[in-house]
Image: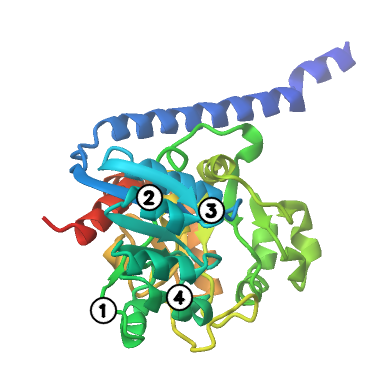
Amino acid sequence: MRKMRARRGRAVRKPRTNRGHAAGFRMGWEHGHWFGRCEAALQGIAVPPSPMKQVHVLFVATGKGFPYSPLDIAIADAFRGQVGQLTITDTKQPVAELALRIRPDIVLVLDGLEFDVAQVDRMREAGIRTAIWFTDDPYYTDITSKLAPHYDVIFTLELVCVEYYRGLGCPNVHYLPLGADPASFRPRNPERSQRHEICFIGSAYWKRVEFFDQVTSFLATKDTHISGIWWERLKRYHLLSGKIELGRWMGPMETANMYNGAKIVINMHRSHNDDTFNNNTAGIPAVSPNPRTFEIAGCATLQLTDFREDLASFYTPGYDIVTYASPQEMIEKIHYYLNHEEERQTIAMRGMLRTMREHTYGKRIECLLGLLFPG
């Protein structure tokens, strides 16, 4: 009897399996509710259709395969519906021969680092207008500086490179950053395994390693997910090894799911003077946001990014994006937003809405066509 009374008086703990089920149900419900809010907000966006240009565009995709192939597809899709005629090829093909046969109004080459400029010269000699959109400035300017003078029009995703190319004798140079493909980078309801407090996706360039070495201990105490190559370079890699998916490239859909599953996504720009794969001996600085800036924001997750001088041309720090300037500030802001859920979601929602209104590839191609064919 005494044993029975003791058992009755003691609080009965729920089995761990029940507690885990309840926590999983709560997380699923919360994310499903947030996903529903985002979908409702997307339906309320009023984006006027892009004007149709009655021109023939020959789009020359990179043809470089992954990870460039999703960019090839996104830009090709953005052209559809905005031009009267679109022909698609890639840099591995006899582009000049095709252009001379179909006589497009413009030939747009994407990236172009592996495209023979002799073909460009041949098209220009035949009176066909050519343009190139550099996608990795300023990190490959040792190469692009030799390519740019062969084209009629230059587009670059780096603001500083506009004057750089003009200084090389290129009269028609325009600033045109990359953007987000809303077919991939949008609100999603990811799997439980893709949900974390903190997420970073990218390569471990040495400047990034130096920074992450200072926040390793903090990230090790959090539900952190890091994916990319070279992360074994970290001084205390062992502290984060269980949280790092090493040496693997993710496609756009999986990347978007990881962004969606995180409460906070860290964005860290590549340094213009990093020792890893750097072809920028001129030391041209970088002030423009990287493509991940738009992709992360499009997923309606809080983006915590290092500051770039031209970032404010696209987002408002503290309103629809959050910035950090030091390892300690990153730690403080992660801690703050993990404990201020409503504020975190408000900023994330604003970033998503602004991205879908202003920073999709559809908007970028609309701008590009307006510059090539004004009026």
Quadrant occupied by the C terminus: bottom left
Residue beneath the point at 26% across and 46% down:
357
Q: Give left or right: position of 332 versus 345.
A: right
The foreground one among 254 and 317 is: 254
Rendered position, 95 above or below 148:
above
Q: Which of the numbered marks, if any, corresponds to residue 171?
A: 1
Mark 2 or mark 4, earlier in chain: 2
Q: Name the residue carrying label 3.
A: 93
Q: Which of the numbered marks, if any, corresponds to residue 101?
A: 2
Q: Residues within 10 Å of mark 3 (few under 14, many from 20)?
A: few
Is residue 112 at all visible to an observer of this figure?
A: yes
Local SS, label 2? helix
- Measure the C-alpha gap from mark 2 to mark 4: 24 Å
Q: Name the residue carrying label 4.
A: 147
Location of residue 126 in the rendering, given as x and y in whole percent from the top left corner: 33, 64
- Measure the C-alpha gap from mark 1 to mark 3: 28 Å
Is residue 347 at all visible to an observer of this figure?
A: no
Location of residue 326 in the rendering, given as x and y in whole percent from the top left corner: 51, 75
Mark 1 or mark 4, earlier in chain: 4
Location of residue 278 in the rendering, given as x and y in whole percent from the top left corner: 59, 78
Location of residue 80 in the rendering, given as x and y in whole percent from the top left corner: 33, 39
